[in-house]
Amino acid sequence: MTTVAVPVRAGAHAYPSATPTPVRLALLGVGQVGGALAALVARPPLSHQFHVESGLVRDLARERPGAEHLQLTANLRHALGGQPQPQIVIEALGGIEPALTLVLTALERGIPVVTANKSLLAAHGDVLIDAAGRAGVPLRYEAAVLAGVPFLGTFARRALARDITGFCGIVNGTTNFMLSRMAAGRTGFAEALAEAQRKGYAEPDPANDVNGVDAVEKLAVLLRHFGDWSVRTQDVDAQGIAAIEGDDLAAAVEFGGTLKSIVAADWREGSLSAFSGPSFLSDSHPLARVNGVQNAVSLRNRLSGDLFFAGAGAGPDVTAATLLDDAAEMCGETPRAEAPRTWKRATPSAPATGWFVRVSGDRLPADTSIADLCSAYGVWLRRTSEPRGDAPGRRWFLTHPCAPSQIADALRALESAAGCDTFRARILEA
Ligand SMILES: NC(=O)c1ccc[n+]([C@@H]2O[C@H](COP(=O)([O-])OP(=O)(O)OC[C@H]3O[C@@H](n4cnc5c(N)ncnc54)[C@H](OP(=O)(O)O)[C@@H]3O)[C@@H](O)[C@H]2O)c1
């Protein structure tokens, strides 16, 4: 792939002009991200380089501050513009349909596509990347994971840097903000969520963030990008953060760490293991220091060790800027058909790890009795919390590594023997 470097001039927010006339864009979706992009492109100097010819929306009557100048359509047949056809399609619709049909149609017509849509890529990335390769047309999705941090494209032209054997990361800003607030302020889950919504970090319906759907979709995008793995999100061992309570964060501090919502994968031995969900990290882990709405990914490179990328994970303005950078890079590319990739379809195994465990109930057994019961299932405790006056009826443990089935069996037996409730999160070793 031949590319022309298109650095942004300091202070000017402009690209060296690749073409004498503005590049014609078709914008699919003029919501938060599409609206921010339209507003960015409307102002000089970017207005000399890009022109949004049409914007696809559902509701033509809705007010769209900053995007009033756009020619809008709600007709899918007009979404990809007329003749001459747009030079680049920017997909900012979200979800699967009509995004899938429109992106495939654009690629088949030879129009390069930029998207920020992790749901689409997680579910249909194989089909889309193959269609782009067949047509010899670029498909870029830098904004789909860590939207404000350009790192996915970096690896396209660097085979040795791209020799990745696993990764771990924090890829959802809403839940990272909530867990950071719960750790810092001893607030509960509901207060942290309400604060995230007040500050505009969480959607009015935060379900996909809180129940882990957003994170596992990004995990699937990263697996395909760095390992050619094709996984179904429903096959990944994934949990949300709704069961975490403020006391759990305090107990994690007592154990010298914190709880974060993590995605992780490993394929060093040729087979794939992966998980997504709340995890205990010791304070020395690089991801333990990633707080608030920040996101980060640590990639394990076979030759050079860990590569760490961190920064803004979302936000309409940063996402729009990343989409436009993708579009600008495409302007210098020479179309070239590529052989179809060989996707490795897999059901990831859930790795054996240590576990952070909370046990709560009115009449908890002594720690030694809990340890004895767990050991009968191959689960060995490595630390127990000090009794706390402010959390009577609650104890926390760290275990040595064991299979998910072993900890599940041990805790089920404990719940039934002692009439208690339990919660567990994985331990992510540094
Ligand atoms: N928001 C962020 O910070 C962020 C960050 C990274 C990635 N992303 C990704 O960017 C994409 C867009 O996110 P967003 O936050 O901008 O979403 P949004 O505010 O809900 O905007 C979606 C836009 O698509 C239009 N649309 C949706 N379904 C349509 C349909 N069937 N026909 C025609 N138009 C349709 C909507 O039209 P109406 O306006 O008429 O409803 C709206 O303009 C998603 O893939 C998201 O995951 C977002």
Image (cartoon, rainbow, N blue to C red):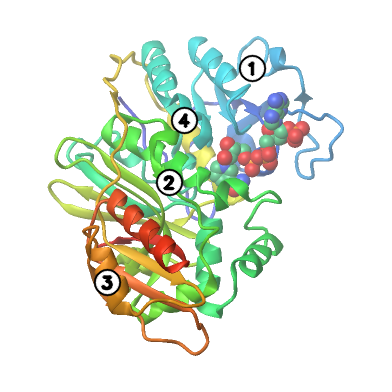
Contact flag, marks 1 and 2 (Cβ < 8 Å): no
* Residue that appears at 81% across and 37% down: 68
In front here: 212 or 402?
402
Residue 343 in the image, given as x and y percentages of width and height:
29, 23
Residue 53 in the image, given as x and y percentages of width and height:
69, 24
Q: Which of marks 4 and 1 is nearer the N terminus?
A: 1
Residue 54 seen in the current view? no
Q: Is mark 4 on a helix, strand or loop?
A: helix
Outermost residue toward the right in this view:
61
Front label number (1 vs 2): 2
In front here: 160 or 1?
160
The type of residue carrying mark 2 is Ala
* Residue that appears at 27% across and 61% down: 354
Q: Earlier in the sequence, mark 3 or mark 2?
A: 2
Q: Residue 80 carries which label?
A: 1
Q: Residue 238 carries which label?
A: 2
Front label number (4 vs 1): 4
Contact flag, marks 3 and 2 (Cβ < 8 Å): no
Q: What element carries label 3?
A: helix
56 sits to left or right of 265: right
The type of residue carrying mark 4 is Leu
For the residues labelled 4 and 3, the Cα–Cα distance comes to 44 Å
Quarter of the N terminus within the rendering: top left
Q: Which of marks 1 and 2 is nearer the N terminus?
A: 1
The type of residue carrying mark 3 is Ala
For the residues labelled 1 and 2, the Cα–Cα distance comes to 36 Å
User: Which residue is denoted by mark 4 in the rendering?
Assistant: 121
User: Which residue is denoted by mark 3 in the rendering?
Assistant: 371
